[in-house]
Image (cartoon, rainbow, N blue to C red):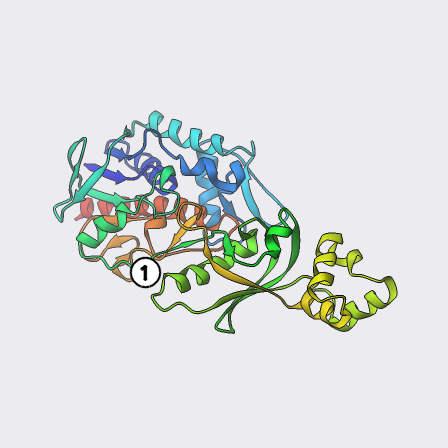
Amino acid sequence: MTEIIIGAGASGLACAIRLKQNMPSDEVILLERLDTVGKKILATGNGRCNLSNEHAENYKEVINFFNNIGLKTRSDSEGRIYPYSNQATTVRDMLEKECIRLGVKIITDCTVKSVDKDLIVSSDCGMFYGDSVIIAAGGKAQSSLGSNGSGYEILKNLGHKITPLSPALVQLTSSSKYPRQLKGQRVKGDMKILLDGECVKKEYGEILFTDYGLSGIVSMNLSEVVSRNFESESHKKCHAVIDLASDFSEDELLEHISKFGSLEGIVGEKISSLLEKQANGDREKICKYAKNWQLIITGTKGYNFAQITSGGADLKQFNNFESVIVKNLYACGEVLDRQFECGGYNLNFAFYSGIKVADEITKKRNRNDKN
């Protein structure tokens, strides 16, 4: 029996390994568009590969999978899980070496053009027939690292619904001059996104000011609603409202200024000076701005900078990751409409869904053998 996996990213590599672990005699063929496998893995977690999170669903299955191929992990205080080496290259290399050890056939520089309902895969490196075909081609984020949206087209042509797509976990752009003046400054506080004055989402955490706008975990986690707004033909006016001193009330800030002359001891010299200029020295306005600092948001940095794609193949058309439209067709990872916040949750889902697909194929095989 032959299984063909399209895409050698996190979910595709995990799926290939688990298939060979479960069914060593099967031929598993892994087709990758780039010249190397797992390239996007190398860019995750600032080069450290935040591969899971202790708060993620099914994370124990992912960690057990890695332990079984010899990769040890460690967690930080917030539950983020990294390879013990703290190097993303270790994760990628261990996955690739395990594929090779198990006998997975890896074909790189191979662009898949189509898959038909008989599970015949057409590519620029030949035709392949699979008893099962797994779409693990990723989304549209950072196409230079592998995924270019082709998986959506393959599934769409097979009758699958693709929900609206937009870049997610991506930096926000702003036309306001203040982020540029604070370039490199970090604050920890509340931030909410307003669309035509209405709050649509808010979050607490680290915010980084940049020359183009806002970055940091909070901005990334709020970016999906911003992207969806600007993808709309009639998008609404978008603002970010930041509480620069979330542990203090306006009255407490005013009391601090009255006693010490400024907010430098709370928000730092640069932000304090900027607020003073913006409020023309009016102490009450300084405190109001510190609690409700509003910036114009013009969009995001787009797919080239996004960590993931929001939207994808509708999960309602899959049962345990198998298509309900085409028998023995599966999908896993980012190509599916299943996204999470920063912190290892998305990679966890990629690995888990790849493992789960392999296990589902195995269960189906065992049931058929008994019959």
- Quadrant of the image occupied by residue 162: bottom left
Q: Nearer the viewer, residue 133 or 121?
A: 121
Q: Report helix, strand or loop for mark 1.
A: loop
Residue 114 location (% of width, % of height): 17, 43
Number of marks drawn? 1
Left or right: 228 with respect to 113? right
* Amino acid type, mark 1: Pro
**On the image, numbered disc 1 is attached to which residue?**
164
Q: Nearer the viewer, residue 274 or 4?
A: 274
Residue 10 location (% of width, % of height): 39, 40
Q: Nearer the viewer, residue 319 or 197?
A: 197
* Image quadrant occupied by the N terminus: top left
Residue beneath the point at 30% across and 55% down: 320
Residue beneath the point at 71% across and 67% down: 279
Pointer 1: residues within 10 angstroms few (<14), some, or many (20+)? some
Residue beneath the point at 24% across and 31% down: 25
Residue beneath the point at 49% across and 46% down: 52
Residue 164 location (% of width, % of height): 32, 60
Left or right: 33 with respect to 115? right
